[in-house]
Amino acid sequence: MITRLLAWRTRLDHLLHIDDSHRLLLWAVVMGVVGALATLLFRAGIQALQWLVPGVPHGSADGMSMVAMAESLPWLWRLALPALGGVIAGFLLLLAKRFAAGRASDYMEVVTMGDGSVPVRESLLRALSSLFTIASGGSIGREGPMVQLAALGASEVGRRFRVAPARLRLLVACGAAAGITSAYNTPIAGAFFIAEIVLGSVAMSSMAPILVSSVVANIVMRELPGYAPPYKMPPFPEIFGGEVLLFSLLGIALGVLAPRFMQLIEFTRVRASRLPLSAPVRLGLAGLGVGAISVGMPQVWGNGYDVVNALLHQPFAWQIVLLILLAKLLATALTVGSGAVGGVFTPTLFVGATLGWLFGSVLNAIWPATTSAPAAYAIVGMGAFLGAATSAPLMAILMIFEMTLSYAVMLPLVLATVIAFVAARGGADVAMYSVTVKRVREARAREQLRATRVRSLIEPAETVVRDDADFEALTRLFLAFPIKYVYVVDARNRYLGAIALSDVTAALLDAPRDAPKPGALALVRPARLATLTPDMSLSEALERFVAHQGERLPAVETPDDPVLLGVVHKTAVLDAYVRLDAAQAGPRLGA
C-alpha cells in the first residue's frame, strides 16, 4: 500500500511540477491534522477514564473540569483516587522502561539530537501512564503527553512514507506545534514555542511549515464538536499613566520567583528519584499526598484551568487565593517530583495568574480608583511568569495576546514579560526545558570565550636568544630544552622571528667541519611562526594553533610593536575551554 502511494506521489510531482518546498508545506498540512487528532484522542481518553469513577455525573466529566469532579466526590474518594491512579501510572512507567531503546524518546530530543524517529511503544505507554495520573486528579499539565502523541503521530506518518531523517525531524516539530496549538487555541504561539524553545531560532525555512501545521490544527479543532478555548478571557482594560510602571514591578517580582518555582520542581524530582522506592509506590504516595490536600482544597486537582478561569471572572478573598496557590504548589511538586508523566506548562500559567492576581489585589486595595482589577494583573502575570520560566518571552507574549485578542494587553504584557525574562536570566540558571538550559549555557560559554583574552595565558619564554647569538649558543639551547624552535629578539626585546631545530641540524650536517657556522641573525626567519597578542580572544588563538603543528606560539605586545612578552601553550588554551565548559555545566539542582 505504501509503495503504491509513493509511486502515485512521484507521478503527481512530475505532473504538477511540485518542488521540495511545496511538498514540505503539503506535509505540514498533514501533520497539522495528525497533531489535532492526537490531542483529541488523549482528551477522549481522559473523559473515558473519568466516566469510570463512581459518583461522577457523566455530564461534568468532559476532561476540562477536574475541580468540579473533585467537589462531586466524597472525601474518601478524593483521598484514594489520586493514589490509585498513581499506582497504575507507576506500573505503566515500569513497563515503558522495558521498551526504552536507549535513544532519544522525548520529542524535543528527537528534533534537536535524534533522527526524527519517536519510539512508539515507549511513548504510548508513557502517554497511558500520564492519562491515569491526570484523570485521577494529579496536579500536572496534560499538554506534555498531548504534544508527545502529536509528535509520535507525525514521526510515524513520515517514517511510513520514508521521509529522510533531516526532513523527518522538521515534520516532528510540525506535529509538536500542532499539539501545542490544539491544547491552547494559540496557533502563532504554538509555532513560536517550537521555534524559540525547541529549535532555538526563528528561521523562515523552518517557521513556514510549522506555522502551516499550527494553523491547520487550529482549524481542525474549531470544526470538531465540543471544542472550547481552555481560558475564557475577560475584556482587558485600557492601561494609562503610571499604572504601566506597576506592571513593570510585577515583571520584576515574577522574574525573581519563576526560577524559584522551577528549582522547587527540580528539587522534588531529584530528591524523590533518590528514594529506594519503585515507581508504583512513589507515584502512589505522591497521589495520596495530593488526595490528602484535596480533601480540604479540591482546587489542587488538575492543571489549574478551572481556578484560573474563576479568578478571571469571579471575586475572591485574597486569603483564599493565597491558600489555593500554596496548596497547588505543594500538589504540583508532589506530582511532578514523583516522576509522573505530564507537563508543567499549564501549572506555570496557573502560578503566574495567581501571583499576578495577588499583586493586583494589593494594589487595588491601596489605590482602588486608579488601578485595574486583579484579573488584569492575572492575565499579564500568566505571560510574564511563563516567559521567565521557559526563557521564551516572545512565545509567552504571543500566547497571551492570542488568548485575549486584545491590543490593550500588549503594552503591559510586553513590558512585564521582557522584564521578567531579564530578571530570571540574571537570577538563576534554570528553565522549564533542559534544551533551553543547555542552549543558554552554550551561549554564555561562547560569550565568555569571546571575552577571555590571551593575556591571562602568557607564560615567560625561556627559549629566547639575542640576534647576535652565535651558533654555539643556539646548539646549547636546543640541547637544554626539548623544543623545535627558539625565538630571536633584538636589543630592545623586539621579536624578530624563530629558528627551527631543523635549520641548526642542517647547518651542522651540510657545512664543512672547519667552515664558520651561521649565527642567530643568519638563521632567523621572521614569518616562520604566527604570533599572538594579549588582547586576542581564545577562539582567535585556537585558530592560530590549528594552523601550527607545535605546542607553543610567541606572544608579542602588538604586531606594530612586537615586544616579546612570553609564550602561550596550546594546552593552556584547551584547558581554558574545558574550564569554561565545566563552569557552564554547573551543579545539578537539588544535589
Image (cartoon, helix red, strand yellow):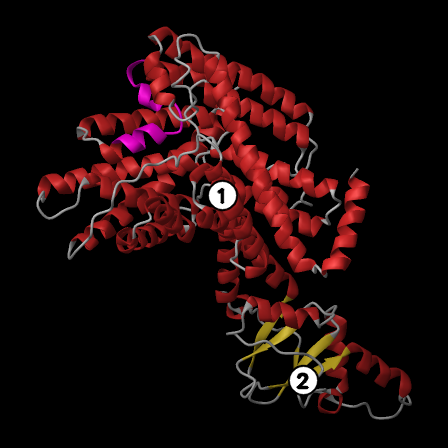
Res 4 quadrant in image: top right
Tag 2 or tag 1, which sits nearer the N-term? 1
Residue 305 belongs to magenta span = yes
Q: Residue at x 27, y 45 (%)?
A: 253
Q: Which residue is mark 1?
A: 219
Badge 2 element: strand
Q: Is residue 527 left or right of residue 43?
A: right
Amino acid type of the residue tagged 1 in the rendering: Ile
Q: Which residue is mark 2?
A: 497
Q: Residue at x 30, y 40 (%)?
A: 233
Q: Could you say which is closer to the camera, residue 433 or residue 468?
A: 433
The majority secondary structure of the magenta stretch comes to helix
Where is the N terminus found, in terms of image quarters?
top right
Label 1 to label 2, Cα distance in Å? 71 Å
Find residue 462 and report its horizontal and vertical position in percent.
63, 73
- Residues drawn in magenta: 295-310
Q: Is residue 31 left or right of residue 263?
A: right
Q: Residue at x 48, y 12 (%)?
A: 52
Residue 491 belongs to magenta span = no
